[in-house]
Amino acid sequence: MAPDVVPACLAELVRDESLPDLIRRWQTGWGPSRGLPVAEESRGGLHVLIGKPDRHRETFVLDADSDPDSLRRLAEDVADAAEPDWLTVPTTEPEAVKLIAKDAGLVPHGATEYLMSIDLADHPRSAAQPPYAVATGVDGQVITARVTHPSGGDAAAAGVMAVNGWDAVADRIETREEHRRRGLGSVVMSALVAEAVTLGAVTGLLVASQDGQHLYSKLGWIRHADILIFTAPR
């Protein structure tokens, strides 16, 4: 539950907040949205046990731009790990990060993603249009939204948002291929935001794919940093 008193213009302060603090805030919500254990902070990074065969542990570098030595150390740790680990690097200097990761023996994994935020009071509202319907559920701090179609089957679109204090972190916003280009992603986000505001959230945070950032930019989300992911070749 969010604190009772919200400082004036709290969401606007995100624009001036340091990147390491934004990463901490995002990860604190992202972890619960996926049922992950609390991250351990050490050596300039947040370390999370994911437990998947191809993603055993993930390290989020907190300050790659101002402290490249910490990035170098963490990159070497991932390169030397016995299990397949991920190194996730938020940065405003992607080319410099790529060189350090390459020197450590790491290779890029997937496309660039983007750390974004929004003042939830400014988030546009979008209702489901017939024959679609949207429903939400709340389990503790985690909100789910599902858009369904009378044809049945899996949800046409769905997403998750975890509320932590004044922050709401969106994750896994997905629309099935046959239902795309109908505004359902906006419907999911609108439903999640409405529930998050009810729970006291003020600021939205997310990490967007390249396709997703186009949608979120149109909805008013602000981009703060690139997100680069690296792994050791195996």
Image: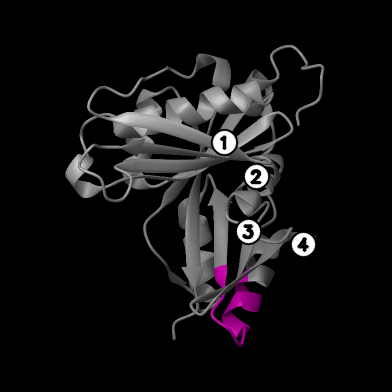
Q: Quick one: label 4 or label 1, which is nearer the N terminus?
A: 4
Label 2, label 1: how many angstroms apart (C-alpha)? 9 Å
Q: Nearer the viewer, residue 14 or 134?
A: 134
Residue under label 3: 60
Q: Is residue 65 visible?
A: no
- Residue 81 position within the rendered picture, expressed as x and y whole percent measured from the top left: 62, 83
Q: Is residue 99 visible?
A: yes
Task: Find the magenta span and give its range.
Answer: 75-86
Determine whether 107 is above or below 206 in the image: below
Label 3, label 2: how many angstroms apart (C-alpha)? 14 Å
Residue under label 1: 205
Q: Nearer the viewer, residue 118 or 73?
A: 118
Q: Residue at the right extreme?
A: 4
Label 2: which secondary element? helix
Residue under label 4: 40
What amino acid is at disc 4? Glu
